[in-house]
Every structure is written in C-alpha cells, then in structure tokens.
C-alpha cells in the first residue's frame, strides 16, 4: 500500500506539468515583490475601518450561527446514523450515512453558489452553506463518538425497562457531550476560515468586500481586509482553544 501511495504521488508530479523553473525565476520573484509592495500602506482611514469591522462581525456571525445550527442538525442525524447498542437494528443507519456523505461531499463554496440562486446575495446563503456542509461533517463525527461509548451505563438503564430516549438523554449524551462540544469548537475554527472565503461568491462578510476591492485593484483596502481576516481567525482559534482546555 505504501509503495502504491508513493507511486501515486510521483505520478501526480509528472502529470500536472508543474512549472518549477518559472515559479522560482527572477522574473516571478520581481513580479511577486512588486505585487506585495502595492499592499503598503494599508488603508486605515476612519471611513473605511468601520466598514471592515462590520464585515468582520458579519463573517463571525455567519461562522457561529452556521456551526451552531450544524451541531444541532448533526446530532439529530447522528442518532439514527449510529448503532447505539449491540441489539440496535439501526434500520436507517445506512441511508443516514449516505445523507451525511452527500452533505459533506459538496464543498461550502459550491453550496453557497447553489444557494445564492435560492436566497440571493448576502450572509444568509453563506450561513446555510456552512450549515449544510458542517452538518455532514459533525453528524459523521458524532455518530462515531456515540458508537464508541462504553455500553455499561446505557445497558444498566435498558435492563430496567427504561425507554431509548431516556437512555440516550441520561446515559449516552452526558458521556459523549464533552467530545461533541470539542468537535463543534474545532469545526468553528474551520468555519471562520471558510466564511471569509464564501464572500468571494457574494455570500457577504469580509470575503465579499475583499472580492470587490481586489477586483478594482485597490490594494491598500485589500491589505486592510486581509489583515482583518488574519486577526479574526487568530481570535477565534484562541477562543476555541481556551474553551476546549476549559472542557478538558
């Protein structure tokens, strides 16, 4: 298997026709240096910064709401998509797994492009795109976590005639909840990056502003927007890391 994987990597380098000489040429270095130089100085004018802050908050709201809705939907799909105990026939497990695969197989950008036709330009399409893709990811992770739970606590309630819903709420969910929250926070870190890109197709936030000003070659404004993206991602990463440490 390792030899086959190595062969695949080598064939990829051969088939893609990568222009390494052109990439590391003096002309490419000069062009890139000139392009980077156009970013300075960034636009920090009092008229522009409030617009950047509003777009950053819109991006943050998209990522938070999309992740929150996806966590709820993922949990609702994970329960029928998991075999919760040895006697569980899990009749809808396979169709649910197919649905989760379909949701996460379509990238956020494609979901956003499709949803723009339905709901129009703006953050609503971006939020729905994040929700659909992340629901597939979290649903699969949640289902795996549920299937790996120690069977003892749930079985102790089940032999006493307790119904499946109460067994899940009082035995399975409390055991797995910290792990579900950790998965959700990790996906939030990913979604803040995705949300900054979704605006490129018109889904609002910093990405939409970036596409507009970059298209007009307003490089000072573009530099400010890129800096705001970096700061926003770092802030969300730090917050998520602190929350996961608190849970631990």
Image (cartoon, rainbow, N blue to C red):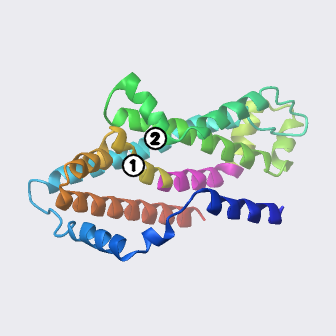
248 inside magenta stretch: no
**Counting other residues with Cα less than 10 Å from the Cα at mark 1, is it few (<14), some (14-19), or many (20 or more)?**
many
Name the spot of residue 72 as percent of width and height, x first. 56, 37
Query: Which residue is the site of mark 1?
Result: 197
| Labelled disc at residue 109 | 2
The N terminus sits in image quarter: bottom right
Q: Is residue 224 above or below residue 211?
A: below
User: Between marks 2 and 1, how big is the CA–CA gap?
Assistant: 8 Å
**Residue in front for this viewpoint, 248 or 113:** 113
Query: How many numbered markers are drawn?
Result: 2
Callout 2 secondary element: helix
187 inside magenta stretch: yes
- Labels 2 and 1: the sequence-earlier one: 2
Name the spot of residue 188 as percent of width and height, x first. 49, 52
Name the spot of residue 126 as percent of width and height, x first. 40, 38
Name the spot of residue 151 as percent of width and height, x first. 85, 47
**Residue in front for this viewpoint, 120 or 54:** 120
Q: Quadrant of residue 95?
A: top right
Residue at 29% across, 74% down:
30
Callout 1 secondary element: helix
* Residue contact at pointers 2 and 1, CB within 8 angstroms: yes
Q: Is residue 42 above or below residue 171?
A: below
Residue sticking out furthest to the left: 46
Specify the segment rendered in magenta: 175-189
Left/right placement of residue 214 relative to residue 63 reads left
Q: Is residue 69 visible?
A: no
Q: Quadrant of residue 48?
A: bottom left
């Amino acid at each position: 298997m390792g030899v086959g994987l190595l062969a695949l990597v080598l064939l990829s380098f051969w088939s893609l026709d990568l222009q390494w000489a052109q990439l590391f040429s003096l002309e490419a270095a000069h062009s890139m240096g000139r392009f980077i130089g156009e970013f300075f100085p960034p636009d920090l004018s009092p008229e522009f910064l409030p617009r950047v802050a509003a777009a950053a908050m819109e991006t943050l709201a998209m990522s938070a709401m999309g992740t929150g809705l996806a966590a709820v939907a993922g949990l609702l799909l994970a329960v029928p998509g998991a075999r919760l105990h040895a006697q569980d026939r899990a009749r809808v497990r396979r169709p649910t797994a197919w649905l989760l695969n379909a949701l996460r197989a379509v990238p956020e950008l494609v979901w956003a492009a499709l949803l723009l036709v339905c709901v129009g330009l703006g953050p609503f399409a971006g939020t729905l795109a994040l929700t659909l893709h992340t629901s597939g990811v979290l649903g699969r992770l949640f289902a795996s976590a549920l299937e790996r739970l120690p069977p003892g606590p749930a079985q102790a309630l089940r032999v006493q005639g307790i119904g499946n819903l109460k067994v899940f709420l009082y035995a399975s969910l409390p055991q797995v909840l910290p792990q579900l929250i950790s998965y959700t926070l990790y996906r939030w870190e990913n979604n803040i990056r995705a949300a900054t890109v979704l605006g490129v197709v018109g889904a609002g936030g910093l990405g939409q502003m970036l596409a507009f000003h970059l298209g007009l070659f307003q490089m000072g404004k573009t530099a400010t927007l890129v800096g705001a993206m970096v700061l926003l991602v770092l802030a969300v990463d730090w917050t998520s890391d602190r929350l996961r440490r608190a849970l631990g």
